Amino acid sequence: MTLRDYVLIVARSWIVIVVTVAVGLVVAGVMALTTTTKYTSSAQVLFTGHAPTSGQDLAYVGNYVQSRMQTYKNLGTSTSMLESVAQAIGSDETPRELAERTDIQVSQLNTVATVSATDTTAKGAAETANTLGAAPVETVRKLEADNAEQTGSDDEGESNATIQGVITGTADEPSSPSDPDIPLYLLAGVLAGLIVSIVVVALREVLGGATSTSTPSGEGP
């Protein structure tokens, strides 16, 4: 088939295409309007190590903090920590329910943890993210201080080093919801409508061609 043939097919089936795309938009719009509105906010927590001397001791502490980032993430998502966060924000959620709407991301390139929270209100999202970000700061400080004391005095840099966490970016109340993303829903509706219309038009052409081929032509006397 040539390009002209495809253009003719589209021209003959424009009603089908318009209707299916319109239906797709309507369905997407209904889904967007009936989806629970959610807001997402994030806070950043920087973990740093301090040593009484510089040089190798300071480099060691920096590498040590980097290697502990996954541990700090696990600490922030632990059941006991989530229970304390839920209590602090006045929520009756279980740790599992709170974990489903919160997240902590760490990188192998730096010592910054990004704490995100989702809520049905902008204020709730920001409050949850800030509370979850602040929760492990004191725990990490105490945990690493106790760990440094237990290492003994053989490694002076390690035993005297302190690890601290500080919130470098507080979570602000988002100005717009993160879900539903109405433009994305509508785009998905248009694409779905186009796909359905292509299938319908293709089936019509195939079945129509098969019918015309199977119909016997009249014979003259």
Image (cartoon, rainbow, N blue to C red):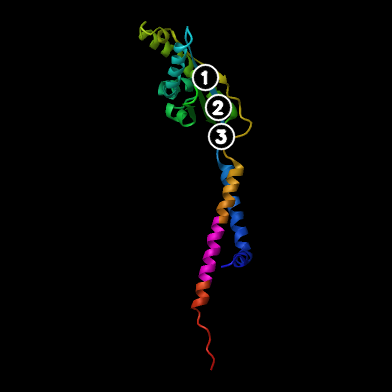
- Say which element carries label 3: loop
- Say which element carries label 1: strand
Q: Is residue 111 above or below residue 191?
A: above
| Residue position for label 3 | 38
| Residue position for label 1 | 46
Residue type at mark 1 is: Leu
The front one of 185 and 34 is: 185
Residue type at mark 2 is: Ser
In the rendered image, the quadrant that contains the N terminus is bottom right
* Closer to the eye: label 2 or 1: 1
Residue type at mark 3 is: Lys
Q: Earlier in the sequence, mark 1 or mark 3?
A: 3
Q: Which residues are magenta?
A: 195-208
Badge 2: residue crowd in 10 Å (few <14, some 14–19, many ≥20): many
Cα gap from disc 2 to disc 3, whole angstroms: 14 Å
Badge 3: residue crowd in 10 Å (few <14, some 14–19, many ≥20): some
Badge 1: residue crowd in 10 Å (few <14, some 14–19, many ≥20): some
| Residue position for label 2 | 42
Q: Residue at x 56, y 63 (%)?
A: 201
Counting the numbered discs, the total is: 3
Q: Is residue 218 visible?
A: yes
